[in-house]
Amino acid sequence: MRYRAIKCIMLVAFACVLLMVSCVPRATEDGALARGDVAFATGDLDEALAEYQLAARQGDAAEAYARVGHTYADLGRVEEARDFYRRATERDRRWANQAGIDLLHLARYAESRSDRFQMASAVETALEFIPGLSVEDLALPLARHYFRDGDFGRALPLYLKALASAPDSAADVLMEVGTAFEEVGDCERALGFFESLRDQVRPRERNEVDWHIGTCSFALGRQSRVDGEGEEALQLVDRTIEVGEPKNIIPQVWFERGEILSEMGECDGAVEAYRMVRALDPASTGALVRRAEERIDELRFGLGSQEVRGSC
């Protein structure tokens, strides 16, 4: 609405110019800027652009460069608008506000047409001219743009801004936020989103959510074990076992459970966990099964070093 108001003001100014044409000698105001204003007012943007560019070449004035930038923004050409508005603000910083407003308007128009690349480019350029410009209404589409491009670090602050204004966001948004946290290595925060999401989706849709819950729980459980937090580590690996995902790492999760229990002095529980590794793949002769069998022998018969056998 603010952009439309500005445009209306410009149209009034252009009308005044047209009125003056009949009242003053042609030589005094038949310049490139005046001709450009008339062309702009009548919707002939190509003609307006040509006249404004001529004025910029003739006078090298901030106003001429700003008019070229404004026309390029109206034509949906972000890079050209940015370049000419830069030249205008280099000469007169007061044009920065107009540049930011024009480019934000262009970003909103691009978003309405689902042109996420132009939207992001226009917002980034608008923020170059007005760093504190509010883009809350574009936070979610911008976040999703960066998410799809794999730029999770840039997506996350925008997702959080969007969630702050709409805490009851749809399940797919929560899924994206959790995934973004997981991708930047923050499984603790990611897990909170996935667990919240699990209660919202139907049972048949839980496999993907459970995959992320299991992955993050296992990663956090292993780190807790390294940090000496046995109880917390046990709860986390048990959560992975409970959701049963990712299926390909479940034997490894049981082995980790055995290691945790062994270090906590829970010998019987540790043996049962190691036996589960073998039970899940009884025909396997892989390294993990062999290690599980070795751990069982160490715990049952006192083989191996005290460091290996833990507190059992």
Image (cartoon, rainbow, N blue to C red):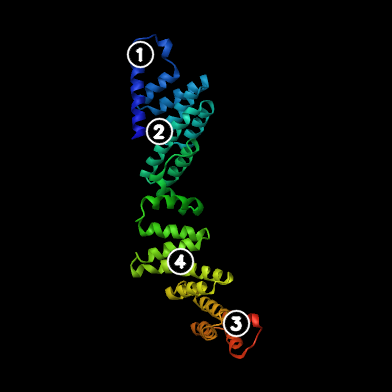
Is residue 19 among what the camera can see? yes
- SS label for mark 2: helix
Q: Could you say where residue 220 lies in the image, as x and y percent from the top left?
A: 52, 68
The residue to which callout 2 is attached is 74
Three-letter code for the amino acid on which mark 4 is drawn: His
Determine the secondary structure under disc 3.
loop
| Classed neighbour count for the residue bearing mark 4: other residues with Cα under 10 Å, few (<14), some (14–19), many (≥20) | many
Name which residue type carries label 1: Met
On the image, numbered disc 4 is attached to which residue?
212
Question: Could you tell which of marks 2 and 1 lies nearer the N-terminus?
Answer: 1
Which is more N-terminal, label 4 or label 3? Answer: 4
Counting from the top left corner in percent of width and height, residue 152 is at 49, 54
- Nearer to us of marks 4 and 1 is 4
The residue at 60%/88% (across/down) is: 297
- Would you say the residues marked 3 and 4 are in contact, meaning their CB atoms lie under 8 Å apart? no
Q: Amino acid at mark 3?
A: Ser
Of the residues tagged 3 and 4, which is closer to the observer?
A: 3
177 or 112, which lies in front?
177
The Cα–Cα distance between marks 4 and 1, rounded to whole angstroms, is 69 Å
Label 3 – label 4 distance at C-alpha = 32 Å
Of 15 and 222, which appears nearest the observer? 222
- Specify the farthest residue to the bottom: 301
Q: Find residue 138 and report its horizontal and vertical position in percent.
A: 40, 45
> Mark 1 — residue?
20
